[in-house]
Image (cartoon, rainbow, N blue to C red):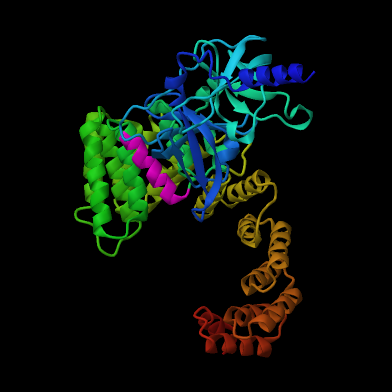
Amino acid sequence: MKKNCFLLILFSLITQWSMAQVPKWLDKSRRAVFSVITYDNDDKILNTGNGFFISEDGLALSDYTLFKGAQRAVVVDCDGKQMQVSTIQGANSMYDVVRFRVETNGKKVAALLIATTGSTVDATVYLLPYSTQKAATFTTGKVKEATSIGDNQYYYGLTMKLDDKMVSCPVMNEAGQVIGLAQKSSGKDVGEICYAVSASYGQALTVSVLSVGNIALKSIGIKKGLPDTEEQALVYLYMSSSSMPAEEYEVLLNDYIVRFPNSADGYIRRANNTIYHATDEASMDKVVADMDRALNVSQKKDDVHYNLAKLIYSYQLTAPEKVYKDWTYEKALSEVRIAIGTDPLPIYTQLEGDILFANKDYAGAFTSYEKVTKSNLASAAAFFSAAKAKEMAQGDINEMIALMDSCIAYCSKPMTSDNAAYLLERARVYMEAKQYRQAMLDYDAYYDAVNAQVNDMFYYYREQACFHAKQFQRALDDVNKAIEINPEEVTYRAELAVVNIRVGRYEEAVKVLKDALTIDPEYSEAYRLMGIAQVQLKQQNEACANFAKAKELGDLNVDSLIEKHCK
């Protein structure tokens, strides 16, 4: 009986930790396995584990859990050499896999070849643990089950005992190809079987444009890599610009330029990022240097001139106390006109108009905007810009109305809060043109477009339109609503008094004005209006006393009233 037991133990040892029948590929393959150490925010050790290289230039796989919360990580190869983890290239928390790049300083490392086909049930597999010993060891087992999780990607159940020190070590097939990353068993399976996720699944993990919001990637503080293609990397840069801390985004821009040195977009984006944070002339010099590089590598020079013009224009809008070198509106105009001379795109002409407008050349700005309105870039915004330039150039008000009509015609119907502001602008122009009923209708349309989400100023402005359109009840309703929202604003109470005087409600007007004076006893207009109401009520003495008080408080409009009623 003892002899049989001894034989059973011996057989188990041979199966689990065999030095006999050593695969030919073992010694070379074991050199691809390494130890991983991750560190937290305080640079203290967070976790330790394993991983392995899948490419000679430093791509590697390990378990996501090891990296979660890490701010930096190093790997230690079988010779004890330490190397920094430079970037995270992809992560999946469900299958507990992370793909990353190790800084190899340009030297090749031993790497495992990933199996192109999955292993079948009952196939023999080998687990290679990390070791610094020259004598290679391994554990053998069988594939118990293989569940498909993608295109030629599997989640394996293995008849193999696994301890914690073997997690994320490579599982190999008999041909010496890696089929998976070892994952420990849990629950009732402890000590009986372990699991492995396809190495090809880990190899396929990438950083893509959708990775900006990836929670698994966000939970790792180590720098993330860029998507593989220039187009995808550009989109990733764009999406990261608003969600990533400034320091991280600057690093990402630098990585992009190293990765795609002949892409003008990288230099242009870095110039924009630099100027946003620029505090001195040295920073501005970097902006110019990047724009010069962009011009050198670009196949489309006009685009670089356009972007430089836009940079200078935006810089000038900040009203710098000391202008950097020749960065004036004239310089911006020169750059955008070079772009227009090469390719007269409407977007270039739009910027030309913006620069001219900012430089107070309103007639010139209108000429540029008018060209845009006749192009394929015609839009509500383009017509609005043209209308504003026409107004500032003191153009015909009916032409302004026609431009605003075209502006609103380009808006989606029904009008929404996104473009409702154009209705307010046209209402203002209608008021200046004394087309009060049209103004009132635009205010009504605005009210509907924003689902009645308006403030006291809106009611005040609409009241003005209603009053001049002789819609007195509506005027009263609106000004009362303004007072309800902002009861401390005496202008609204004065306006309510004006409407009451207009409809012959003089006593009500006096009452409203007395209320206004309790808020501001030195509000001169209230005294003048009260005097007007009292004249109508035949209260001559009271009226003249109030006119005198208004004059005392500096009201310049009361003299004619005193001349007429108080002699």
Seen in the picture, residue 253 relative to 454 is either above or below; the reply is above
Seen in the picture, residue 262 relative to 407 is either above or below; the reply is above
Quadrant of residue 473 within the rendered picture: bottom right
Q: Is residue 76 left or right of residue 487?
A: left
Quarter of the image containing the C terminus? Answer: bottom right
Q: Position of residue 373 (x, y in %)?
A: 40, 34
Viewer-closest of 304 and 273: 273
Q: Position of residue 160 (x, y in %)?
A: 66, 22
Seen in the picture, residue 11 relative to 76 is either above or below; the reply is above
Q: Position of residue 334 (x, y in %)?
A: 21, 43
For the question of whether residue 258 can be seen, the reply is: yes
Quarter of the image containing the N terminus? Answer: top right
Q: Is residue 490 magenta?
A: no
Q: Is residue 143 left or right of residue 110?
A: right
The structure residue drawn at horizontal position 62% and vertical position 47%, both measured from the top left corner, is: 446
For the question of whether residue 367 can be seen, the reply is: no
The structure residue drawn at horizontal position 52% and vertical position 37%, both measured from the top left corner, is: 212
Viewer-closest of 336 and 395: 336
The structure residue drawn at horizontal position 58% and vertical position 52%, both measured from the top left corner, is: 436
Viewer-closest of 10 and 502: 10
The stretch of residues the image draws in magenta is 245-258
Q: How many numbered discs sit on the rendered protein? A: 0
Viewer-closest of 175 and 329: 175
Q: Is residue 401 left or right of residue 437?
A: left
